[in-house]
Structures are given as C-alpha cells and as structure tokens.
Amino acid sequence: MPEKKSISVKRVFTLLLAYIMFCGAGGVVMTGFLLPAVFGANAVIKTVAPSLKAEGIDFSIADLPQASTLYAADNSKITSFYTQNRIVVPLSEVSDIMKKAMVASEDRRFFQHSGVDIQGVMRAFVQTYIKSGGGTQGGSSLTQQYVKNVLLSQAESDDDPIAAYHATEDTIARKLREMLIAVQIEKEYSKAEILQGYLNIAQFGTRNLYGVESAARRYFNKSAKDLNLVEAATITPITQNPAKYDPSIEANQPEAQRQRNLVLDIMLQEGYITQQEHDEAFNTPIKDTLHITSVAQGCMAAGDAAFFCTYVVKQIENSPEFGETKEERQKLLNAGGLEIHTTLDVNANNAAMNAAKEGIPVNDPSQFEMIIAAIRPGTGEVLGFGINRTYDATSAAASDPTRTAVNYAVDQKDGGGTGFSVGSTWKPINLVAWMRAGRSINEVLPAANSVNERTDIPDYKANVTWTVSNSGRAGTAESPLMGLVNSHNTTQAAMLKVIGLTPILNAAADMGYHSAAIADEGKSLLEQKTLYNPPMVIGTGVSASPLTMANVYATIAANGVQCTPIALTKVVDRNGKDIPVPSANCHQAIDPEIAQTVAYAMNQGVVTPSGAAHTAQLANGRKTFAKTGTNENEYLVTAGFTPEVAAFAIAGNAEGYTKEYDKKTGTWTTTNGFTNRTINGVFHDTWFGYQLVTPVWVNFMNTYLDAAGIPANNDYGTPSSKYTAVLNSAGTSKSDGTATDAGGDASNQSGTTGQNGTTNRSETTNQGNGNNTGATSTPAPTATQQAQQQTQQQNQQQGAQNNNAGQENAGQQQSGQ
C-alpha cells in the first residue's frame, strides 16, 4: 500500500479553512475554489465531489451483506450463514432510546449540521495538531462514519483490497473524501435514512457482528425495538472499538461498562434522560444485564442437523438457480439474506441420529460408521440423516475418527463419498425387471444351492465362469417370490438367465438408482463396467449412496412414482422474492401393480418366520416392507419402507478396508471387516445385517413414525394377479389343482398371507412345480406355507439369516439377508 505522506500543521490548517469555506458555500463544487497547491487536493475534489454516481456508491441498506437463515420443515431455525452477521431492520424497528443514545454519543449536532460538524472538525483539529501531547481525536460526524462504512463494505463486496485500503487509511485525503461525500448524501437522504443506514451497517462487536438488530440479539437476546436505556448505552460505544468494547468478552466488561457510563453521562447532559434514569442505569453492573447468545454460524452450528445442512449447502452450490458460478452461489448464501426453507423433518433427523449412535456409539472401538438416510415416498423430500459421528469441519477431524465433515449418506458431488456396496438390497430391483418382462413371481426356476457354469445370459457375451451359491440352504428349484423372501442368490442368477442384464439396469435407473461417484456422472448404467456383469444381480459390484437406495425403495413405496431427492422447498431473497428451487420431477416410473407386488414380496420376507427380513417387523402390527443384506464381510445393510417413509441403513468402514491375499486359497480377505469383532459391547465371529443394522433400522422407523403420529397403513402391498399367476412351459395356465413348493414337493395347500405380522389377509398366490409349470384355479400356498415345506432343506437359524456377497472369479459369489 502507498506510504502516508507527512503533512505540516500549516498545510493542515490551510486545508481546514478551505473546507470550511467549501461547506459554507453549501458544498457546491467549484474547481477553482481550492488551490492546487493545497495538498494537490484539487484532483481529489474533482473526482469525488460531482455526484455519488461518479463514485459508484450504493447507499441502499437493502443491498448490505445480510445473514441467510436455514429453516426446517416446521420453520424452526437450523442455522445461519454469513460473512457479516447482519439483519437489516427499518428505523421504526429500533427503540427510540437506542436512536437517542447513538446520536448523543456519536454526533450530538447530527440534526443541525449538513453532513459535517464544523465544530467537531475544529475541535479535533486543535486536539490533534495544535495541543502538545493532545493525542488524536476524531471529528467525524455520524454521516461521515456512515460514508466510511459504506465505502469499506462496498470494497469488501467487490473484493477490492485497494479500495478497502483507501476507505480506511489514516490520511487527510480520506477524511476530505468522506466530508465531500457526506455533504452530498445529506442532500439526497433524510436524517432518518442516514441514521437508519448507520445503525444497520456499523460493526457492533467481534465475530463479524454487524447492525443494531444482530447486536441486540447477540448481547440481550431481544430485538432492537425492545432495547432499554442500559442496553442501548451498552451497545452504542462498541462501534468505536468493536474488539475492545465487545461485552461478550469477559475481559472487556470493565471497560465496556465504563464506556456505557460515559454514554449515559452524555445523554443526561443532552437532556435525553433524567437524573434518576441515569443513576439507576449507571449503577447497574453490566454483567447483570447481558444475555449472551451464540453467534456460531454455518453447519458447525446446526447440531444434529449438521449433515443435512451440508447437503443443503451443496444443493445450493450445485444449482444454477442460485447463480451462474459456484462462487456467485456461495456469495448469495453467505451475504444474500436468504430465507431457506427445507424438507428437514426434525423428528426424522433426531430419530436417525439417535438410532445410528445407539447402534454403534460414536466412540465405539470398532470405529465402524452407522449411516441412515430417510426420504418421503412420492415427494422426493429428504427427511434427515443419521451418522454416528460428530460433525466437525475443522482440521481437528483429521486426527479424530469420531469426527467428520463428510456426509456419508449422499453422493460425492453432494459432499459424500463414492458409495457403499448395497448387497442383497438390490434384489427387489431384479423382481421389478422380472415383472416388466411379463413374468410371474410364482414361476419356478432352477435354483440349486450352488451354480458354477459359464454365463449364458441373453445380452451378455463375455466368456467367463460365474460361481454363485447360497448360504445354508440346499434345493433344486425356487420361485422369484421365494428367492426374494429367502434372499437366495441362485434364484437371482436363474432370473438373470431369462431376462438378461439390460432390463435389470433399466429398471434400476427408472427407480432412481445411480452411481455416487463423480467419475460416473453422465454415464448410463450400461456404460458402467462394474455394473454390467452377472454378479450385479446379487449386489456385487453395485455401489450407491444410502440416500439413493432409500429413494429406490421410496419408488416402490409410492406406487411406482419416482422422484429426484430434494432438500429445498422454498427460498426467499432479501426483497421477499422467491428464487426457484430444484424440482423433484416426480413421475410414474414403474407400473403401480408391479410396485404393489414387489411390496407384497418384501412384506412376505418379514412375516415369513424363515424370511430373510423377519427381524425387521415394526411395532404395533404395522405392515412392514424390508430387505436385509451383508456384503463381503464389509457392509451390513437394511432397507425398507412404509407408505410414509423409506429408509436405508448401513454399517461399515466408510474410509475403506484393508485386504490381504492368501496364496494358499488364492483369495483376498478383508482384515478389518466384521469377522471376530466386538461392536457396542457384543462379540460375534461373523456379523450379519439382521444382527446389527436391522435393529437400528427398526429403531429409527418406530421412533419416527411414533413421534410424527403417523397411523398404520396396512392396505399397501396387494399383489396383482397379473404377476402372481403361474404359467406352464407353453405359456398357458395349468389347472391340475396342485401347487408345488420351491423344492419340488407336491402340495395342495391354500391359505392366508400374513400382511402385518399379527393378522392374516386372504391372498391368492399360485406356486408352480418345475420350470414354468404350475396351477391355477386353486389358491397356492403363501410364502409362509411354502417356507414351511422347505424346513427340511434349510437351517432356520443360520440359513435364513446368512447374507454374503462374493466376487467374480474369486471363489463363491454369495449375497444374502
């Protein structure tokens, strides 16, 4: 920055006289009035004085940087964002005693002068330049101080350090500039407008505290219109030295009280208050008057909503509705005075955070993450997130595994990671594709306990051997319905050989599935090589964010209506104008009858005693739709829904795993996975999803549904006869009056289907015998009855729960409950 030039008393006095003459002439600019020899100031006057427009100065308080506020769906405040913590208010919203205190302290002749207090200037001149050892004394009028603040604010807004320097440099040239502009604005604005501007723009404390309204809230937890005498006198002098007089700093309080009392003395002298009012306020300890509130801002101040907060910030930064560039969007967020209304359901978010931390405590030695994402079906509204971590965006998080600023529940572009393996929670997607191909969920397919053969898939020509097996179950045939109920892998493989990979990927995309990785943006699912492989049907090689998978399940829960997840419902700018927000783009993605039938199959996995999801039953007989999963000893998952909320929960190491190669077996082993681990005080040699994550999912769902007062809706999930009929190999209905279980044992049973875990509703489901054979006219055994017929073929305690996903060409491919 340029060095300040020294100036003689004589030259200062000459300038002072010239300025007084200038003011006496009503501030009219005369280019020959001030001699060029006086400081070379003539050029400054020519440049500054002609008009405010020439300076490009904006004196509108509406354009001052203001804090933006983030609200939950119930309009409760989540947090604020700001570069300057300011809330602009009109003068009518400031108490009269506050106005009097400011005028008395800063510019007692404010209502008499025309922008510059000549008496004040003379006094300051004599004190500073004439009296020996007199020190420096300011002579700026309140109008001049307003000008200084406006110039500095504009320079900061323009990111112009040169302008900021010239707005604050301690030089006569700066003072002269302020004087000239002050005279001009007194012609353009009323005294009330100038006082209003100053009270809104001035700095009233440390930590970026600006404006009288923010100061009132900070120090006294009230609005500026409610400030009393002692409070107004406390706030007023802070503008002179915010760091030194900020009363929220305990060490400052003695000096802050002294400054307050000086203001009271002046107010008494000027006749604004009585002696009694003065004495009562004067003798009140400052610490007894304070009610300090937090000025923490941003997502660090959002508490348990911090992870949702980061998601909202990313939505704004990534949305062109808020500016052409990311920088413009960030500036709007931090200085635009926005009211940001979100989809955050406080009950849901609290339930998710508590369930995650109860499932695996924050400081659990295992250091596994527990993550939950919840969404409202049919709307795209993100209800909340649960992560068993403390949100921390500081550098301290790098060395503390219990703290993070990463929202693991969302996509990478939204502040998350590249996703997690979804395991068997993928399998309902297979069932959607199956029915879209015109198939019945009761067709019986060859589904031996282990399949080891070259791929024979309609749209997959790679010459590879795919080994896939089930865990703890032996059999020869099974329907897609029972394949989902039992979470059997070989049934998924059999379905794949009939319909191929492409229909499954298309169904996944239509239901809202996509990769979480930024690297996959713009690629179709068919272009993603890790997906376009046979093991995809059991969830191997499939990664997604928990929010994406919750949204996939929400599509099933909403009668096939798919929506893009949204976090914003309304954004209002400082002028009360709505800013468009990203749309959920809700649309019918899959046939409602298919959605209902998939829901039915998922519910059968819950109500069937041997079903893979039988531990996921919700409280109070509420009809439950869920799917569990375990993937490669690395991730345990549970996903499901009711018609009102869909949620996905997952446990694992969000930072990745360490693998070791076993030369003897030729396989890779995860060394820090779920084998032989103690989690939350419980040891298992092998952990499964139903043991750890399902209770967390159930905890969240029960807690939220109860807190939200949502009644049970047990009517959803009625299967369509269109997709439950059984066809023979000729494609026609068989009517021999028999129905056969998945293992091939003949049966002529009919019965009821358990719909809510406690009561049964009569449903007709035909289960065939052999491959594409079956019967009609006679009600088929329900999933529960079919499972009972398989009891001799599976271990109910182990086989119904085991859920493993394997890798291609590296031993068995397994994926289960």
Image (tube, helix red, strand yellow):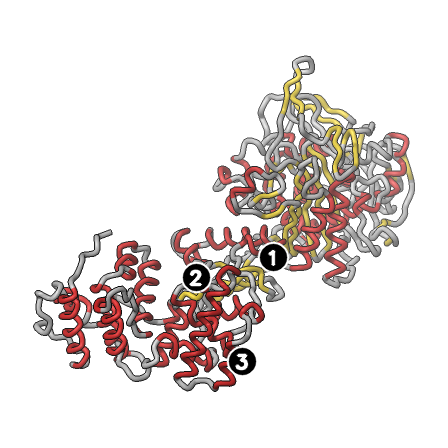
**Residue in front for this viewpoint, 434 or 14:** 14
Q: Is 215 or 488 nearer to us in this picture?
A: 215
Foreground: 177 or 489? 177
Tell whether 210 sits left or right of 70. Answer: left
The answer to whether marks 2 and 3 mark residues whose Cβ atoms lie closer than 8 Å is: no
Single out the mark in the foreground, 2 or 1. 2
Report the side of 399 relative to 194 (left or right): right
Secondary structure state at the residue bearing disc 3: helix
Task: Name the residue located 56 percent from the left edge and 47 percent from the top edge.
Answer: 392
Towards the viewer: 524 or 377: 377
| Residue 652 x %, y % | 67, 37
Find residue 65 and report its horizontal and vertical position in percent: 40, 63
Q: What residue is shown with label 2? A: 244
Label 3 CA crowd tier, 10 Å (few <14, some 14–19, many 20+): few
The image quadrant that residue 774 belongs to is top right
Q: In whole angstroms, how far apart are the C-alphas of marks 2 and 3? A: 25 Å
Residue type at tag 1: Glu
Q: Earlier in the sequence, mark 2 or mark 3?
A: 2
Q: Which mark is residue 501?
A: none
Quarter of the image where the C terminus is located: top right
Residue at the disc numbered 1: 381
User: Where 347 sits versus 123, above or below?
Assistant: above
- Name the residue beneath numbered marker 3: 280
Residue 395 place in picture, x, y as percent? 51, 42
Residue lying at 58% horizontally and 46% vertically, measured from the top left: 407
For the question of whether residue 330 can be seen, the reply is yes
Closest to the camera, between mark 2 and mark 3, is 3
Q: Amino acid at mark 3?
A: Glu
Residue found farthest to the front: 132
